[in-house]
Image (cartoon, helix red, strand yellow):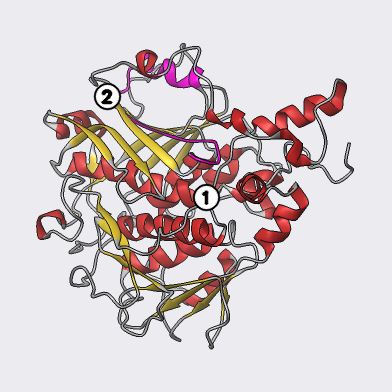
Amino acid sequence: MSPHLPTVDQLNRLAKTVMQRHRVNYEQALTILGGFHLHLVCLVASIRRPQYQAALLTAVNVGKRAFLGGVTVQLPPDVKCVLPGWFDQPLNAVVHELGGQVVSVRPAAHKTVWIGFSGAAQPSDLVLIADGWRGGFVPAGLAAPFPETDGFALGGVFAAGLVVSRAFAEVAGLALGGCDEPFGLSLWRLDLPWTDENARGPALSLLPARLWLLGLGHLGQAYLWTLGLLPFASDSNPMLFLQDFDHITSGNWSAGMLCEEGVTGELKTRACAAWIERRGFITRLIERPFDAHTRVGTDEPKIALCGFDNVAGRRVLEDAKFHLIVECGLGSSFDFFDRLMLHTFPGASKRPEEVWLETAQPDVVDFDASLFGAELADGECGVLLDELTRKPISASFVGAAASALVVAELLRGLHGGQRYELILLHLRANGSLRTVEKAELYQQRHAANSKLRPAASSSP
């Protein structure tokens, strides 16, 4: 067996896309990823707005985990951060904390993204556009799709996940042409073009007081990231129940938005709690698996966000008696790792055990084990290669985009919007969105969970 073969805990999950696309071994894939460089340009007219700061910080956070050659940022001086956890800190210091490098001159980069509209973008650049409920991009040279106004973080988080996804797919050779046409979504009205005025959505007025997060891996950490950027009142003390039993490994860095070197080896519950508590949240930790015996207590959160990567946990979701579960799952193979599928329960047309059969198999099994530089063999070597082969491909930019859709499902319910029992989106494909609506008075599902007003009204 090659001495350079990673352990399962060390594996960079995104490297497997490069291995499969370019038919290279693991070390060669890391070298290719190390040559990718993302550059972000911020304009003074946009970057003081919450949605664009959320887009910038999200793009830095997920970009560094995919573009291993680094993320550079051109940023106006003397801009203060307006987002929770970093409020009133210099924005350039926050960028540095998250792993970005602030520069004064545009460097050579594989992809350049402008945060907010600019007519100065060069032909190969992308222009990220967002407000409270909407997010997407336009290629350089096209007009802004709607007037830029102040908003909240949600649209910026989605736009950043989407744009970094498209940028990575292009430079890695996974999908060509994905950056040639404008694309975006309204998380308020998925049935309308994102440029439609009716897709703008209402001003944010309500936020959930309590939530239960099931699973704190790739998706659960992304949910926390997005929740932590929302404008909760400083004295509101929202409560989160955080349920997971696993430790953070070095391999989690490539996909987990809250995984940094300093937390390797910690329980995920502890690291995640520390991060979100710095944003004014109260946490309760459940450090055991979710299973068919889990039940919601009388005074516990009645709404859950689920980020499981296994069928067994999903099949028994309704047994816990939550009033609302927003669940999201991701693909795991070269073709589908950037595809996300959101479900809401209960009351959907299918129960979880009908959606996920016990015999369901992940789509990652198509990976060629020989790309790791050795053939499958008996014994310890063969077991390791089999585990590496079956480890799902995952990327933090997919989690970021998925988290915006999941949190939007909550916020839409609080504001009297449409419930979706199914949302399917493949990030690299413009025409992939599919939805199934559920007709009901959505606000009733939030009634037992109480509500909070955000710190200030924003106009999306």
Between residue 192 and residue 448, name the one nearer to us: 192
Q: Residues within 10 Å of mark 2 (few under 14, many from 20)?
A: many
Residue 27, image x, y percentages: 77, 52
**Can you say whether 298 is above or below 415 in the image?**
above
Please give the name of the residue rendered at 19% of the width and 34% of the height, measured from the top-left corner.
419
Label 1 secondary element: helix
Q: Using the image, tell me which numbered label, if any, was put on residue 327.
A: none
- What range of the chain is rendered magenta? 311-335
Q: Is residue 325 magenta?
A: yes
Q: Quadrant of the N terminus?
A: top right
Q: Quadrant of residue 69?
A: bottom right
For the question of whether residue 213 can be seen, the reply is yes
Between residue 259 and residue 21, name the one nearer to us: 21
Q: Quadrant of residue 148?
A: bottom left
Mark 2 highlights which residue? Answer: 323
Residue 458, image x, y percentages: 20, 63
> How many marks on residues?
2
Name which residue type carries label 2: His
Mark 1 highlights which residue? Answer: 396
For the question of whether residue 86 can be seen, the reply is no
**Can you say whether 203 is above or below 288 in the image?**
below
Q: CA distance from mark 2 to mark 1?
A: 29 Å
Q: Is residue 302 left or right of residue 81?
A: left
Q: Is residue 184 magenta?
A: no
**Can you say whether 115 is above or below 268 in the image?**
below
Label 2 secondary element: loop
Please give the name of the residue rendered at 20% of the width and 54% of the height, measured from the top-left corner.
204
Residue 440, image x, y percentages: 12, 28
Please give the name of the residue rendered at 69% of the width and 33% of the height, measured from the top-left corner.
389
Q: Is residue 265 left or right of residue 242?
A: right
Looking at marks 2 and 1 on the same chain, the residue that comes earlier in the sequence is marked by 2
Name which residue type carries label 1: Ser
